[in-house]
Image (spheres, rainbow, N blue to C red):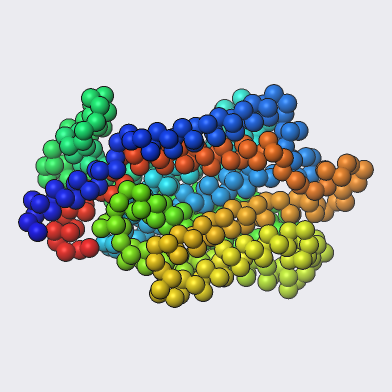
Amino acid sequence: MEPINLSEKITTDILRPVGITKSFKIWMTALLVAFGICIYAYTLQLRNGLGVTGLRDYISWGMYIANFVFFVASSLIGMLISAVLGLSGAKWITPIARIAEIIALAFASVAGLVIISDMGRPERLPNVFIYGRIQSPILWDVTVVTTYVVISALLLYLPLIPDLAICSRRMDTPPWLRKIYRLMSLGWSGTPEQTAMIQKCTRILLILIVPVALAIHTVTSWLFAATPRAGWNSSVFGPYFVSGAFVAGAAAVIIAMYFFRRNYKLHDYITDSHFDKMGKLLVLVSLVYLYFNINEFLVPGYKLEKAEAKYLHEIFAGRYAVLFWSAQLLGVIIPIILLLIKSVRKPLPMMIIAAFVLAASWIKRLLIVVPTQEHPFLPIQYVPQNFKFYTPTLTETLITLASIILVLIIVTILSKFFPVIPIEETINELKHGDK
């Protein structure tokens, strides 16, 4: 195929799904209706207080904080795909790097809002910035989350500038949208100077995001590990959380790859080879995560101190045993075994496996947050039964779902108004035979 025809075909294929379509309107309407119902549940919490949830004096962190940890975890995939693999020279990530960045930005942005849902007095959030103490891990967490969101947004935007210029010229869209594309493209004309500047800025951001991404989930782990509670009092929570984050993020990217490939007709660009490589990557990070899981329970199990013994019994054979073993088997062990088989590393099987891994990742965060609070050092006495055990309410569940729906809304909008695959990079790589 001639280079001009190749460039034309690639541009047409990638831009075809971009824009406001009937299916987009139906999907967005469904999401907004569901989001509206969940927001109504949050108004009930604002009016009546956190008493409408399952949170009480002893179990003060529940689904909200588990959701926060899960969202922060999933957002780290942008760093792993774009920075670690990108800086190492892995060319195969080109078609999925932007997908990873979209997921990273969506999850990281909503993670901050999830914290607000856990606050009984959200209007006091500015006090964290005004009166925050440098000794507080909460202030560290707010700082690194905000920094990560900013860098993720820039990493999504800068490589998108050349494609925005193409969108402003090529797309059959309303004048106002073409004007936005033109403004966002910053007068891009593709000169060598502009290209060099974009590449230099992007490389600097890719280097900067590595320590920031590691910090964001390490600091989140310190919110737990800085306490003496059984189940949280661990020196390996930092790498344990980071390795688990890569597992959750990789699973989220695989699911997104499948739906973008299928619904946007991008089979020529998101190929079976990409799913095969993502399957191998998921096996790698899952093996690291499995090691930290074993380490996390083997050491306290060997020492078996009184508080740790109660906690371990509760998750291994007690109230949370079904959730714990389901998360370990369906979310870590069985996926590792299946993905070692080459024939399983295909789009549909990979998507199904990734869905189990992602669901298990959320359950795992719930198991990190809740059981240890039900077993404090001092006995729980003279309180109602519902103070002793945590049971989420419908209101709390709807508010938790609101954050998940908001992530879907952000991903949908970004993927329908901007090409999910880099146009210029794809053209250049296919021309040079790097695919």
Tell me which residue sits at (42%, 57%) in the image.
Answer: 254
Which residue is pictured at 25% across the width and 58% down the height? 268
User: In this figure, what is the number of numbered marks?
Assistant: 0
Q: Residue furthest right?
A: 382
Position of residue 186 relative to residue 404, above or below, is: above
Please tell me which residue is depicted at 59% across the width and 53% down the height of the picture.
362
On the picture, is 384 further left or further right than 117?
right
Q: Quadrant of residue 150?
A: top left
Q: In which quadrant of the rendered view does residue 394 lie?
A: top right
Q: Is residue 68 above or below residue 346?
A: above
Q: Is residue 207 visible?
A: no
**Quadrant where the C terminus lies?**
bottom left
Question: Is 3 or 62 nearer to us in this picture?
Answer: 3
382 in relation to 79, above or below = above
Quarter of the view holding residue 328: bottom right
Q: In the image, 281: left or right of 64? A: left
Residue 104 appears at what percent x and percent y? Answer: 43, 47
Q: Quadrant of the N terminus?
A: bottom left
Residue 369 percent coordinates (x, y): 67, 51
Percent coordinates x, y for residue 35 in the rendering: 54, 33
Residue at horizontal 57%, vertical 70%?
333
Residue 273 or residue 215, whichever sits in front: 273
Foreground of the two, 77 or 232: 77
Q: Nearer the viewer, residue 409 or 222?
A: 409
Compared across the picture, whether 46 is left or right of 113 comes to right
x and y percentages locating residue 195 in the rendered image: 17, 45
